[in-house]
Image (cartoon, rainbow, N blue to C red):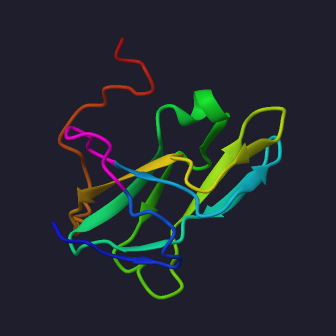
């Protein structure tokens, strides 16, 4: 799949799949920053990625980011819509420092990963009754 990408700064590397079996590509900040304890900041990546029609770009923390850096994506994941690809639509990483100390990040630190997922648009069909019995939720299945 061909994907259009714009770099605000040519020194920012293009995202890379680290291995042949990687399902996601790494995303890094385009500048150094310090994230104060228990604070959220948005860190620029220097990238605008044109998500292909019929897809979304999902951004998540790399599995090592919480343990190594004490950081997580503030809302768990980031979702980049298909129409977020204009000249001012730079992808930013919204990072939460969940530690009691400031966390320093450097330009190029691989903190997040992105992957494209196919999406479906739905049409709602409102019903008066449901065809199934309630099964319970939030762990009530055992």
Label count reads 0
**Residue 54: x %, y % from top left:** 20, 70
Please tell me which residue lies in front, 54 or 141. Answer: 54
Please tell me which residue lies in front, 85 or 29. Answer: 29
Q: What residue is rendered at 22% in x and 75% in y?
A: 53
Relative to 58, residue 36 above or below: above
Q: What residue is rendered at 61% in x and 56% in y?
A: 107
In which quarter of the view is residue 22 placed? top left
**Residue 126: x %, y % from top left:** 26, 63
Magenta span includes 55: no
**Residue 117: x %, y % from top left:** 25, 56
Please tell me which residue lies in front, 121 or 132. Answer: 121
Q: What residue is rendered at 52% in x and 55% in y?
A: 28
- The N terminus appears in which quarter of the rendering? bottom left
Dominant SS type (magenta): loop
In the image, which residues are magenta? 16-24
């Amino acid at each position: 799949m061909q994907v259009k990408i714009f770099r605000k700064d040519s020194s920012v590397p293009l995202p890379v799949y680290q291995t042949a079996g990687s399902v996601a590509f790494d995303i890094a900040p385009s500048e150094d920053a310090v994230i104060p304890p228990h604070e959220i900041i948005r860190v620029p990546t220097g990238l605008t990625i044109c998500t292909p029609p019929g897809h979304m770009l999902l951004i998540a923390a790399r599995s090592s980011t919480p343990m190594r850096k004490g950081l997580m994506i503030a809302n768990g994941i980031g979702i980049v819509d298909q129409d977020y690809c204009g000249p001012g639509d730079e992808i930013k990483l919204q990072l939460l420092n969940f530690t009691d100390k400031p966390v320093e990040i450097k330009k190029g630190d691989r903190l997040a990963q992105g992957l494209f997922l196919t999406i479906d648009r739905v049409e709602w069909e409102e019903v008066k009754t449901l065809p199934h019995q309630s099964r319970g939720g939030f762990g009530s299945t055992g």
